[in-house]
């Protein structure tokens, strides 16, 4: 099958979860024997070593302005790509202000599939909700509904992202991991600091400041920890300043943004992976927990037991054999979950083996691509 996958607002390759997802899924589809074309933004800088394309053919789109409300304008370039490539199916990564690829495919008579990783429905405080309240005709809602009506199929990381009337027909596909690149490092030692890895884009709901407070609790109780924070974002500076204010800067290292190709090495050097979340800090999560954090699957593949928030959807992905859960937005509970693992290194080693096995059995990108493949075939047929 000839596939044109479009992500008009996403720089690829990149460090953001959307960039990683798009490229990894396309690579996995190419490994299944498809001819895969990926249309996305060119990254602003190479940033060092990156993931190989492995047969994926890149097509770079124009960045119209540094604002996402113009993503729909990529439609003209995508129409030209469709005429040149003649794909069997077009996939568009959903964005409220996207839809250019769906419209171009509709005009060309090519089946279109919508990949939904963010809310395709209204929620309090959303930009589309605010814009529509300023008008009578609700243009953003009308445009979103047109995207949904014109696609032949939908797959999504959570049905909660899809309007209620379309939830039953949507296929749920969580994110995944490349188990060839993410592999376990050496076994956890019985002595010395427990090395914790935290991968984040430092959004308000990613719990970075909760982690700093939790580490402060651990240090005050003389629990030996070494924490590596990988990534950068809006709360990065605040979290780093909080670490200095609480006097734990020697225990926590903020390495900043690194190319995704370097993340496996950093995780292989760790003993556990920490994924704190503060759902009350993100209004979209009033819809319910729809997140499918790529870092959790990368932790598993690296053989890292996961410390994460006690949320039903995360428990469904994980289990007590591979994860310690804590009450969301409770730094003391997070500290206790970390300290429990620090005190039982044998349990960490057992959980490490179970984590790697779970990644291999359920969460490879090849597993996820097989399900996407079924969706695309149904759309074409």
Image (tube, rainbow, N blue to C red):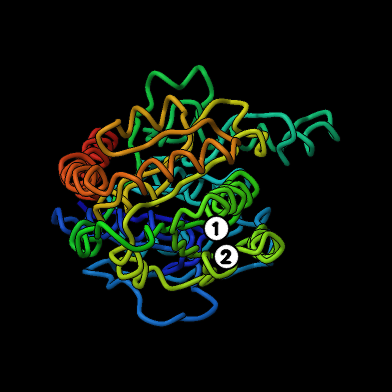
Depicted 44 relative to depicted 41: above or below: below
Q: Residue at x 61, y 58 (%)?
A: 73
Front-lying residue, 207 or 212:
212
* 125 relative position to 170: left or right: right
Helix, strand or loop at disc 1? Answer: loop
Q: Which residue is drawn at 42% across and 73% down?
A: 259
Where on the picture, by quarter, is residue 26?
Answer: bottom left
- Residue extending furthest toward the right: 134
CA neighbours of label 1 inside 10 A, class few (<14), some (14 to 19), many (20+):
some
Residue 82's spot in the image, x, y percent? 38, 58
Depicted 378 relative to depicted 227: above or below: above
Q: Residue 12 carries which label?
A: none
Residue 13's spot in the image, x, y percent? 41, 69
Quadrant assignment for the C terminus = top left
Q: Mark 1 points at which residue?
A: 201
Mark-to-mark CA distance, 1 and 2: 5 Å
* 28 relative position to 11: left or right: left
Helix, strand or loop at disc 2? Answer: loop
Tally the numbered discs. 2
Q: Which of marks 1 and 2 is nearer the N terminus?
A: 1
* 168 relative position to 45: left or right: left
Residue 359 appears in the figure: yes
Q: Which residue is drawn at 22% across and 55% down?
A: 28
Where on the picture, by quarter, is residue 157?
Answer: top left
Q: Which residue is drawn at 36% across and 49% down?
A: 342
Q: Mark 2 points at which residue?
A: 232
- Residue extending furthest toward the front: 222
Front-lying residue, 117 or 166:
117
Residue 286's spot in the image, x, y percent? 62, 27
């Amino acid at each position: 099958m000839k596939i044109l996958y479009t992500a008009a607002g996403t720089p690829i390759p990149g460090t953001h979860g959307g960039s990683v997802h798009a490229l990894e899924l396309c690579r996995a589809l190419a490994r299944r024997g498809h001819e895969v074309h990926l249309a996305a933004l060119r990254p602003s800088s190479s940033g060092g070593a990156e993931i190989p394309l492995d047969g994926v053919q890149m097509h770079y789109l124009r960045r119209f302005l540094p604002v996402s409300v113009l993503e729909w304008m990529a439609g003209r370039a995508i129409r030209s790509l469709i005429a040149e490539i003649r794909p069997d199916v077009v996939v568009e990564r959903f964005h409220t202000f996207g839809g250019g690829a769906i419209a171009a495919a509709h005009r060309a008579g090519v089946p279109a599939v919508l990949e939904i990783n963010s809310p395709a429905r209204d929620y309090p405080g959303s930009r589309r909700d605010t814009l529509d309240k300023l008008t009578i005709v609700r243009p953003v809602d009308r445009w979103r509904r047109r995207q949904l009506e014109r696609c032949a199929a939908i797959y999504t990381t959570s049905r909660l992202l899809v309007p209620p009337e379309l939830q039953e027909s949507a296929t749920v596909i969580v994110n995944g991991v490349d188990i060839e690149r993410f592999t376990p490092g050496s076994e956890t030692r019985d002595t010395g600091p427990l090395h914790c890895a935290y991968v984040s884009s430092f959004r308000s709901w990613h719990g970075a400041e909760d982690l700093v407070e939790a580490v402060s609790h651990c240090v005050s109780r003389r629990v030996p920890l070494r924490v590596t924070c990988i990534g950068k974002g809006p709360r990065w500076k605040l979290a780093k300043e909080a670490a200095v204010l609480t006097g734990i800067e020697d225990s926590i290292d903020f390495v900043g943004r690194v190319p995704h190709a370097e993340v496996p090495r950093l995780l292989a050097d760790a003993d556990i992976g920490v994924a704190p979340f503060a759902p009350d800090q993100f209004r979209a999560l009033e819809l319910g927990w729809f997140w499918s954090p790529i870092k959790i699957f990368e932790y598993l593949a690296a053989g890292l037991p996961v410390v994460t928030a006690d949320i039903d959807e995360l428990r469904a992905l994980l289990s007590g054999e591979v994860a310690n859960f804590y009450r969301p937005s409770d730094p003391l509970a997070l500290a206790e979950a970390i300290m429990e693992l620090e005190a039982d290194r044998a349990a960490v080693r057992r959980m490490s083996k179970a984590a790697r096995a779970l990644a291999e059995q359920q969460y490879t990108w090849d597993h996820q691509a097989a399900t996407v493949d079924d969706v695309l075939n149904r759309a074409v047929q």
